[in-house]
Image (cartoon, rainbow, N blue to C red):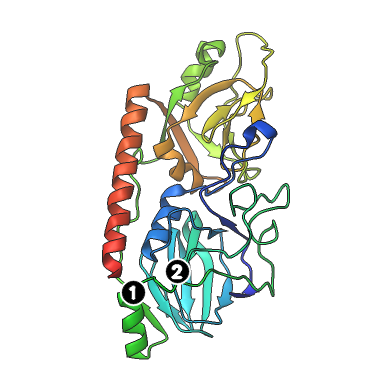
Amino acid sequence: MNIERPGMYSMFQDLGRCGHQGIGVSVNGPMDEWSHRLANALVGNPKDAAVLECTLSGPRASFSEDVVFALCGASMNASVNGLMVPQNCAVYLRRGALLDVGDRISGARVYLAVRGGGLASPAVLGSRSTNSRAGFGGFNGRALRKDDRVPFFAPGKDDFTLRIEKYGLQSGLTLVAGPQLPSTPPYAPGDLVRFVAGPHWAAFTEAARSTFTSEPYKVSPQSDRMGSRLSGTLLRLTRPLELISEATVFGTVQVPPDGSPIVLMADRQSAGGYPKIGYVLSADLPKVAQLLPGESLRFQEASQVEAERSWRTFKTRLSEVCEAAAASLT
């Protein structure tokens, strides 16, 4: 892939660098697992293949070979030689054609998967995810830049030819799109984000707990892949706490001394010592990942049973959608 314009913040992520937080290495991985997994399924890739995660805008790029790709996640103005490119489906593209993933329409992050197994770069600690703060993984440990030439794994010799590849070759068209699939994960409706109470829930004042579950919070412009910083009514403790740092997880809601909550995201630090008022349900994390600065959310408390049930529903629905994607390829 030859990059003419990289987009605002485009970098490669697989499912993450698990098992190394004990030595201070962040997990990384996709902010929106649903869209990442669906994009890979739509092109017949393994679920953990490294795909390009693009924030707010995507790349303008061409390919040196015919490719099959998919775009999932945020709605973007995407085109090829002036023709609109649909999302949530496999797309056959002839080599040399210019793919232009422009500005967002809704959502924050779109995922570009290319058939063949994803980014062809060495794995670091078992993952090709980009750790931009440490400068390793992905493509040279950083976001894409103009004039980068990005290698992808080619489909294996034993891989079957996709139906859309046959149509593309037979038609002679520059662009051929397959059937679109539903793309919305089963998370809480509207602006609600569910959470389970954290270990320090009772350490916050009654007013703070009430505020957290009744008033809206806005995503701050200081948010990034490390954490979604929220602005709104400040949350106060009943008394100061001295805590021992412990491992963090995706979705931990920490409250630093200034009282503004932070939802820890994919590039979170490996350990943290701020009070934890709650944990966002895993099923609702794609929603948080797709929020832009200035957009609002409301927290709704859920039980541990509801959290587990929602995650099973999420995984079951994701498996069904990915199976439908696989079925559409043959």
Q: Residue 148: horizontal and vertical position, in percent?
A: 68, 72
Q: Residue 323: horizontal and vertical position, in percent?
A: 29, 56
Report which quarter residue 243 is drawn in: top right
Query: Are circles 1 and 2 on residues that touch, CB within 8 Å?
Result: yes
Find disc 2 in the rendering and name its residue: 115
Q: Is mark 1 on a helix, strand or loop?
A: loop
In this view, the residue in front, 273 or 254, is 273
Q: What element carries label 2?
A: loop
Q: Residue 134: horizontal and vertical position, in percent?
A: 73, 47
Q: As displayed, is residue 152 above or below residue 323?
A: below
Report which quarter residue 307 is drawn in: top left
Residue kind at label 1, given as amino acid type: Leu
Q: As displayed, is residue 129 above or below residue 205?
A: below
All told, the count of numbered labels is 2
* Residue 242 seen from this side: yes
In this view, the residue in front, 13 or 77, is 13
Q: Which quadrant, please, contains the N terminus?
A: bottom right
Furthest residue toward top: 239
Q: Which residue is drawn at 55% across and 29% down?
A: 253
* Residue 303 seen from this side: no
In this view, the residue in front, 191 or 53, is 53
Q: Residue 281: horizontal and vertical position, in percent?
A: 42, 32
In terms of sequence position, does the residue under pointer 1 or pointer 2 come before the other?
2
Residue kind at label 2, given as amino acid type: Arg
Find disc 1 in the rendering and name its residue: 162
Q: Which residue is drawn at 49% across and 59% down?
A: 110
CA separation in Å, label 1 and label 2: 10 Å
Q: Which quadrant, please, contains the C terminus?
A: bottom left
Q: Residue at x 58, y 65 (%)?
A: 120
